[in-house]
Image (tube, grey):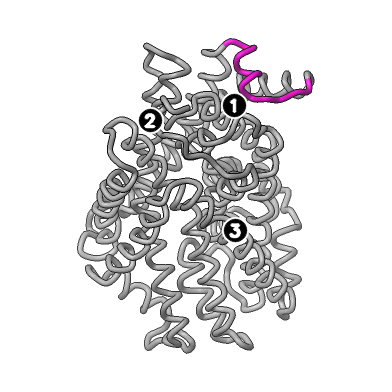
Amino acid sequence: MSGSGIGHDQWKTRFGFMLAAMGSAVGLGNIWRFSYVAGESGGATFLLIYLFFVLIIGIPLLLTEFSIGKAGQMDAVGSFKRLAPNTKWHLTGLMGVIGGILILSFYSVVSGWTLFYLYQYVTGAYWTEPDGGFGAAFEAWTSNPVAPLFWQALFLGLTILIVMRGIKKGIEKANNLLMPALAILLIFMAVYGLTLDGASEGLAFLFTPDWSMLTEPSVYFMALGQAFFSLSIGICGMLTYSSYLKAKDRLPAATVGIGLMDTVFALIAGVMIFTAVFSYGVEPDSGPPLVFIILPSIFEGMPAGHIVGIVFFVLLTMAAFSSALSLLELPVAYVHRTLGLTRKAATLIMGSIIFVLGIAASLGFGVWSHIQINGNNILDMMDNITANVILPLGGLLMAIFVGWYLNRNQAINNSEIESPILQKVWYNIVRFLVPVVMIVILFISLFDI
């Protein structure tokens, strides 16, 4: 709609939209976060609960978010204003925009580390263990006040250049290249992992449930949080992407496809990481350092490990970019419409604000490491606020909006589900189940932060 303030920029194809949405979903969350959260939460038991939540909560909620964006045909705030004029519902969109800015500010810090590691592998610097080991090198590097900022700026700069070019020429084109390449590299790495000596132990950890873990409430909480984080629901990034769809592009099949492919990516990443981790006798619950400290030391001992290291960090960097594009598009679309700026100006301004916020997250590992709440540094605090509060609160509000504010016919028409049985199932999940689950998550996380 030309009156939307976004102009006529749309996805060229529905497949392009699916790849971009999958790109948004498949980021460091699937590879970096999934592997250590699964490691800390009992492997296969966590995986089963995670899959259950993706199917029962994740996909219905993803369709809910898509339905708001496609019906609203505007950015996160504008879509709510169009569907619920003269109400306060647009504040849900605004919270999403703020959440996107916050997430990208710390996400770009970790992505900067990924780029730096890729550089170290390409130049050969990390083919052998640095003096003092990878752990000491990682700590020394992340606590350096200046060097990580350069890589963070480089990562954000490249993201800005792509988003500036718009939906068809920028984001869609980039994801059409990134996602197939990412899939090929991920499968290559997983197959390579299966050839390692201890691969069967890694597979057993990932696919043999420890049923006693089912009584651990934290596993459910972590699995639900991960389902949210990895599908990037709740901050209106997916809403923004779906607003660029053409009328003929149907939502339900695309949503299921995105949800399932995202899960497949996470599973393959798990195979890739846990086969390596168990083959080299490393604890699977090593937490966030897994990717930056433990895997490089594993690569060093592998045959052709330097090649594996290069491929792995190329893969990680591509995953980081595909998610960063949607996180930046979210505030850019809003600023572009409300302030009437050109896309170029809106992208530059938002990118700069995000970089400045990211500086704080980066310095939290060095000169500002004394700033802590409950033992969390600045980056962890940002991660906690977004993953445990903004995402579930956004998901809750969207479910209430579609399930309770819109009338039933409007909600079902916007969802584009054709089967009467599935209409009923989806509508009842969104109306009753999702709000209850979201309130429980919020309740637990607010007492936990």
Mark 2–mark 1 Cα distance, whole angstroms, equals 32 Å
Question: For mark 2, what is the residue?
Answer: 5
If you read the primary sequence from the N terminus, does the residue marked by circle 1 or circle 3 appear first?
3
Confirm whether the magenta stretch covers residue 17.
no
In the drawing, does residue 402 fall left or right of residue 88?
right
Q: What amino acid is labelled 3 in the image?
A: Met
Is residue 449 something that shows in the picture?
no
- Classify mark 2: helix, strand or loop: loop
Q: Is the residue under label 3 in contact with that under label 1 (CB below 8 Å)?
A: no
Residue depicted at x 47% and y 58%: 321
Crowding near the residue tagged with mark 1, few <14, some 14–19, many ≥20 C-alpha atoms within 10 Å: many
Q: Where residue 423 sits in the image (x, y, percent)? A: 72, 21
Instruction: Give neighbour class at mark 3: few <14, some 14-19, many 20+ (Cα, 10 Å).
Output: many
Q: Nearer the viewer, residue 68 or 172?
A: 172
Report the span colored magenta: 407-419
**Residue type highlighted by circle 1:** Val
* Residue type indicated by callout 2: Gly
Q: Which residue shows up at 55% across the image and 42% down it?
A: 11
Task: Find residue 138 and report its horizontal and vertical position in percent.
Answer: 37, 74
Q: Which residue is mark 1?
A: 434
Query: Who is closer to the viewer here, 51 or 445?
Result: 51
Q: Nearer the viewer, mark 1 or mark 3?
A: 3
Residue 424: image quadrant is: top right
Find the residue positioned furthest to the left: 367
Report the residue marked by disc 3.
179
Which of pointers 2 and 1 indicates the residue nearer the eye?
A: 2
Is the Cβ of the residue at disc 2 closer than 8 Å to that at disc 1?
Answer: no
| Sequence-wise first label, 3 or 2 | 2
The residue drawn where x is 28% and y is 54% is 355
Instruction: Check the image and report above or below for 297 versus 384.
Output: below
